[in-house]
Amino acid sequence: MAIPGSVQLPAEICIPSAVSSAPVTKLAPRHSALVRFTHWITTICFFALLLTGIEIVISHPRFYWGETGTVLTKPLFQLPIPSSRRLVPTGYGYVLPDQNGWSRALHFEAAWITVLTGLLYVVSGLLTGHFRKNLLPSNADFSWRALLTSFTKPLRFERPSVADASSYNVLQRLTYLFVIFVLFPLVIWSGLAMSLGFASAFPWSVTLLGGRQSAR
């Protein structure tokens, strides 16, 4: 019986829904805490290397091929930007503020943190089977249908299924492995090749890259 002056609500609003009372299932993280930690550290170091690398390039935006390169040497190519060094010929009538000191120090520190973090990630990935379980493609992934599907499906902007959202497709796996085991070591190698101490200890490593300026 309704009370005079009161508002009678529909029955479906008064009865609690079975869906709302159901417990919410919390999805477990796809990767371990160590994998996420090393990825975040690498991301921070990447932006530090990018910022300081830009500042270092601004101090001498001329690139050479071979072992040596100076302001009197014809460059292989030159970035169309002013330099932060007055003696570097760029064609501009002014120079930018020189930030080469702190940028080189931070670049060096961020590079070594990245190397140590990468080693920790690779060692843990090998010991825990992270690469085998999450990144190594299976034989079925190399079929033309699987490769074509992994390339065209994201272009259709379809909502991924639960299975697709919880794993990488073959192109993502191959890209990940290429970055970890090819690009990342190449970046470390070329960076060490610009060090005079490393070049004197391992001259062959610099020669394979074509010289210190080629590594740069």
Image (spheres, rainbow, N blue to C red):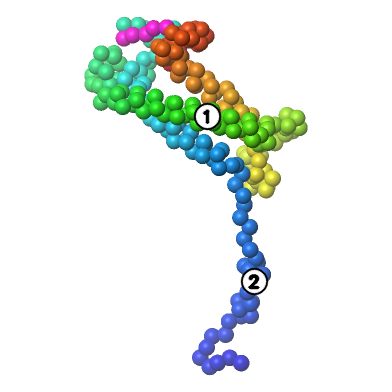
Q: Which residues are magenta?
A: 67-71
94 drawn magenta: no
Q: Residue at x 51, y 39 (%)?
A: 37
Label annotation for residue 118? 1
Residue 96 falls left or right of residue 28: left
Q: Residue at x 44, y 26 (%)?
A: 112
Given residues 194 and 119, the one toward you in this image is: 119
Say few, some or many: other residues with alpha carbon within 10 Å of mark 2 (under 14 / 14 to 19 / 20 or more).
few
How far apart are the two marked residues, 1 and 2, measured between alpha carbons?
50 Å
The image quadrant that residue 175 belongs to is top right
Residue 192 x/y as whole percent: 45, 17
Q: Residue furthest front?
A: 127
Label annotation for residue 17? 2
- Name the amino acid type tagged 1: Gly
Q: Residue at x 63, y 57 (%)?
A: 25
Residue 33 x/y as whole percent: 55, 42
Residue 207 x/y as whole percent: 49, 7
